[in-house]
Amino acid sequence: MSDTYKILFLGDVVGEPGRNIVREELPKLKVMHEPLFIVVNGENSAGGLGITPKIADQLFEWGADVITLGNHAFNKREIEPYLETSQRIVRPINMPIGVPGRGLTYIVKEDIRLGVLNLCGRVYMDSYGDPFESIDQVVGQLDTPHFFVDFHGEATSEKIAMGWHCAGRATAVVGTHTHVTTADETVLPGGTAYITDVGMCGPRHSVLGMNREVILKRFRTTLPQRFEVANEPGVLCGVVIEANRSTGRATAIRRIKSETEA
């Protein structure tokens, strides 16, 4: 057995095009990269906003071990009971006490206990608790060195700051929410894999997954528009992280991208 293992993370799944490409490509990625853990951000998987129990079950059926969410976690109200009963889906941990669900979960494979945490940033976002304080509280309670963070945020500066805040403490800190893949993947000092944004799994010829004509009209007229998921071929964006089995420290991170035929 190798002294390292891999985590495959897929960026925000957007609507039906995103679900379709995950269903088609994830089996191939499992064969190609042989990840021990698969984490998928599903917060835009239901019509571009939120997630439903049915879609969550599909993502698990297709291979996800854990689903992370974000600022649209509760757009589909039917997900609330599911968040309470499922141990494999996490909403942002820095939400008020009493909000359904959990922000941290654990999954065990081959004697490796991986903690998966979901956080929301506060810059240009809704009112969330201090994500840096939340991280500190969690790290102080961890019983495993294997710790994965999905930081769902708008501002690149806040995401980069979170990466440095977790350097040497988390196995990985990956950014989500902006749907555009950044090219700054790196392993920070202390062995924490980092990338500012993983990108999305959604319609390729779109504006962040939405119909580009609608978005263009919004920008050109400033008038309100009803956003809709673009009906376009899909693109899948993610990262593969390699980490030491004993220490939980990352040794490598690599971007991946797959596209369906037009």
Image (cartoon, rainbow, N blue to C red):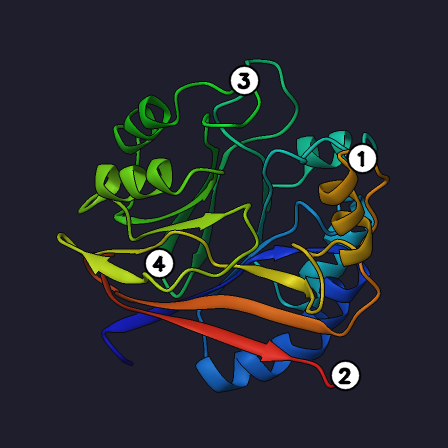
SS at circle 1 = loop
SS at circle 2 = loop
Q: Disc 3 or 2, which lies upstream in sequence?
A: 3
The N terminus appears in which quarter of the rendering? bottom left
Q: In the image, is 188 to the left or to the right of 194?
A: left
The residue that appears at 13% across and 53% down in the rendered structure is 189
Decide: few, some or many residues near mark 2? Use Cα within 10 Å; few <14, some 14-19, many ≥20. few
Q: In this view, does 221 lie above or below 138?
A: below
Q: Mark 1 points at which residue?
A: 76
Q: Disc 2 or 4, which lies upstream in sequence?
A: 4
Q: Which mark is residue 112?
A: 4
The residue that appears at 82% across and 32% down in the rendered structure is 224
Identity, as a three-letter code, of the amino acid under mark 3: Ser
Q: Disc 4 or 1, which lies upstream in sequence?
A: 1
Distance from the alpha carbon under mark 2 to that under mark 4: 40 Å
SS at circle 3 = loop
Distance from the alpha carbon under mark 3 to that under mark 2: 40 Å
Closer to viewer: mark 2 or mark 4: 2
Task: Kindly indicate whether the residue at mark 1 contacts the one at mark 4 (C-beta within 8 angstroms).
Answer: no
Q: Disc 3 or 1, which lies upstream in sequence?
A: 1
SS at circle 4 = strand
Q: Mark 3 points at which residue?
A: 127
The residue that appears at 73% across and 52% down in the rendered structure is 45
Identity, as a three-letter code, of the amino acid under mark 2: Ala
* Residue 50 visible somewhere in the drawing: no
Q: Mark 2 points at which residue?
A: 262
Q: In this view, does 54 lie above or below 133?
A: below
Query: What is the quadrant of residue 108 in the picture?
Result: bottom left
Distance from the alpha carbon under mark 1 to that under mark 2: 30 Å
Closer to viewer: mark 1 or mark 2: 2
